[in-house]
Structure formats: C-alpha cells, structure tokens
Amino acid sequence: MMNSFFNFIDLHNGEEKREKVLENVISNISFRGSNLWILACAIIIASVGLNVNSTAVIIGAMLISPLMGPIVGAGFALGTYNFPLLKKSMKNLLIATVVSLTVSAFYFYISPFKDVQSELLARTSPNIYDVLIAFFGGLVGIIAITRVEKGNPIPGVAIATALMPPLCTAGFGLATSNYSYFFGAFYLYIINCFFICIATFFVVKYLKYPSVIIDSVYEKRIRYGISALILVMIVPSFYLAYNLFNEKKFIKTAELFIQKEFDNKGYTIVYKKLNYNSSPKSIDLAFLNKKFNPQEIASYNKILVDNGLSDTKFIVRQSSEDVKSEILNEINKNIVNVSAKDIAISKLRQELDGYKISDSTLLYEIKAIYPSVHNISYGKIEEYPKTDSARLSFVLMYSGKMANKEQFKNWLEIRLHEKDVKLIENPKE
C-alpha cells in the first residue's frame, strides 16, 4: 500500500531525459542578442503597467520576460556542483539585472507621471508570504522543466514569482531618488531569485542528477552557505510580515473604534486617515457638523487605550480651511478614479456599438417584401479573413424558400449600408 502511494507521487514518473533537461537549462541562461532585446522590451512594458496601474499589462510583461533562465541555471548548477555553469548563470543574471534597472530607471526618469500607484507600492514591502510564493513557484518551475510533457505551469510560474515588477519598482526608486522604495523592491527581487534557485536545488538533489564534482568538503560548504543565506533572507521577511500583521490589526481596531464612537451615534465623517507609520500612530478625522472641545478630544484619547489602541493619537480637523483642503484632495482622488472608469466604460460602449443593429423596422420590411421568409435572426459576427485582424460582417439566418437570393442580398447591403452581407439558410427547414 505504501509502495503504491510513493509510486503515485514519485517525480521520476514522466521525467525527461537528463541530457535534454541540461541542454534546455543551458540554452536559456545566456543574455545575448534577442534575449536582451526581449528583456528590455518586457521591462518597458512592466514599467508602463506600473506607471498606469494596469495589472493586465504587468502580467503580460511577466509572461514574456526571460529572467527565469539564469536563476534556474544557478539552482541547477548548485544541485550538480557545476561551478562553471554557476559562474555563467550568475554572470548572466547580473547582466540582466543591471540592464533591467537601467532601462526601468531611464523610463521612469523621462516619464511625466511619477505618482506612486497601488501596483508599484505593493512591491516595496516584501514579507514571508513572498518567500513562500517564490519557493513554491520555483518548485513548480523546475518540476515542469524536468517533465517530458511541459504542460502550462511555466507561464503561471512567471506570473506568480513576479520577477519583473520588483525590478521596475527598484528602477522607479532610483529615478525618483526614493531609496526606501529601491531597497524594498530590490530585496523582494533578491528573495524571488534566491528561493527559486533554492527550490531548483532541492528538486535537482531529489531527482539525483549526477554531480560534476564529487567532494564531501565542497558539498558541506555549499549546504552551510545555503543554510546561512536562507536565514539572512527569511529573518527580515518575518519582521516585515509581523509589521504588516500589526498594521492590519491597527486598522481593524481603529475602524471598530470609529464605528462604535461616531458612526453608531450618527456623526457624519467627511475625512478619515489612519496613520500606522507615524509616531505615535494617529486617527485623523473631520466631521460635517460636530465640533469637539479640547476636553472631549482628551477623553477620546484616553478611550483609545481601553479599545486596544495604545500609542495612538486622536486628531480632529475642525478648522474650515483644513477640512476644505482635505475634502478637495479626496474629491480629486475620486475624480481620477471615476475618470479612468468612465474611459473604460466608453471604450466598451464603442465596441458594443459596432455589434449593435438599432433598426426596429428591418424585420417588418423583410416580411413585407419577402413573405415566404420566416424564422429570421440576424446580427454581426467577427471574421478573420486569413489575417490576424478581425472585421465585422452582417449575417442573416432564415427559413423558407427564396426565389432570388442574390436580389435579397443586394437589397440588404443597400438597406443596411453594409459591403458584404452573409445569408445562411436554416438547414432544418
């Protein structure tokens, strides 16, 4: 029973020839010519995606990025103690990293839009969850590479491990001299590279790929080195994850406090800002009508401790100028968001209008001129006439006998101002 279970999960089932796997790994390491151009283009695409806050564009850049090659090569080289291959992989990874940082920094330097969007901000504070994503993504990647049937995990690994966005965010940090962004994003990039590499190392060891150099001293050194690096990488990420947990906890507790003390009492809040990173932390509010005297504000600051919000200051904006400026800022932010949604809706409406046939009398005219035709249905469909581009064509399906089909077709083309109308007779009739 146990033997059948282990056979069921054995990674040796469906394994590709090892010479072919090695050849495939080596071929994807080098960054020369086309690979370098593809990388530069992918960096530009990812930078634009971060700039305009488009998740779809960022995913597209991750799919075409060739960055995984030298990272997997380094892990493969470590697993087989192939130091010339490790040297080559690290050299090419360094080239790719420098090129990526240079291209992204140049793009953000010349870009007129330097606002920090949510997609960009998400890459500045890595934590333990990023470690898990990189490690298990790397496992999937190397397992897929060692299979005869590659399947579709590779594109998913490229998206999940997300090597491109952190590099572009680091480039943004360089271009705007925001070094906290640079170090945070570059740390995330190093985490992704390192744990993809380590996952590759473990799978290569598990599959027992032959070592180039069999030396117990080298093997021990590599193991100790990897263990030390894992600790160096994981410890800061645990701290950042703990910090993120505390921030989420603070926001949740603060929201409950606001709901209990103000929302439930009917006070209308026109401005709210919860600042976890200030010292002390702060809850900044402005109300539509309610005014607080200094004694009331002091009492609320005391209540904060009872509600689990120690080291937190309660601030009320009561100056009309302060309230006005904050409300205007919030309105401007909402206008930007609404404008983006309006543009997207407008584009969708334009696309739908291309398919729409707003002619209520057409069906009655057809029945009056061609009474033998019935069960009529019509609309526009996309055609691909031996090219990658599509065109819309009017198609009409009908039942019944028609004496002169060509005359009917010509009439429809003139009536609808369409160049090529397709007539399809219902085969069931």
Image (tube, grey):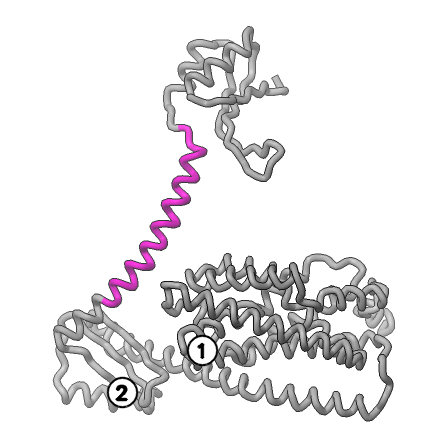
Residue designated by label 1? 181
Give the x, y percent position of residue 123: 49, 73
Observer-nearest of 350 and 287: 350
* Mark 1, secondary structure of its residue: helix
Q: Quadrant of residue 37?
A: bottom right
Q: Quadrant of the N terminus?
A: bottom right
Image: 322 above or below 405: below
Give the residue type at disc 2. Lys
Image: 290 above or below 40: below
Residue range in magenta is 329-357
Q: Quadrant of the C terminus?
A: top right
Q: Can the viewer see residue 157?
A: no
Residue designated by label 2? 313
* Mark 2, secondary structure of its residue: strand
- In the image, what residue occupies the spot 58% across and 73% down? 97
Tag count? 2
Q: Quadrant of residue 4?
A: bottom right
Mark toward the viewer: 2 or 1: 1
Give the x, y percent position of residue 188: 54, 77
Q: Can the viewer see residue 332?
A: yes
Mark 2 or mark 1: whose residue is earlier in sequence = 1
Give the x, y percent position of residue 142: 73, 69
* Crowding near the residue tagged with mark 1, few <14, some 14–19, many ≥20 C-alpha atoms within 10 Å: many
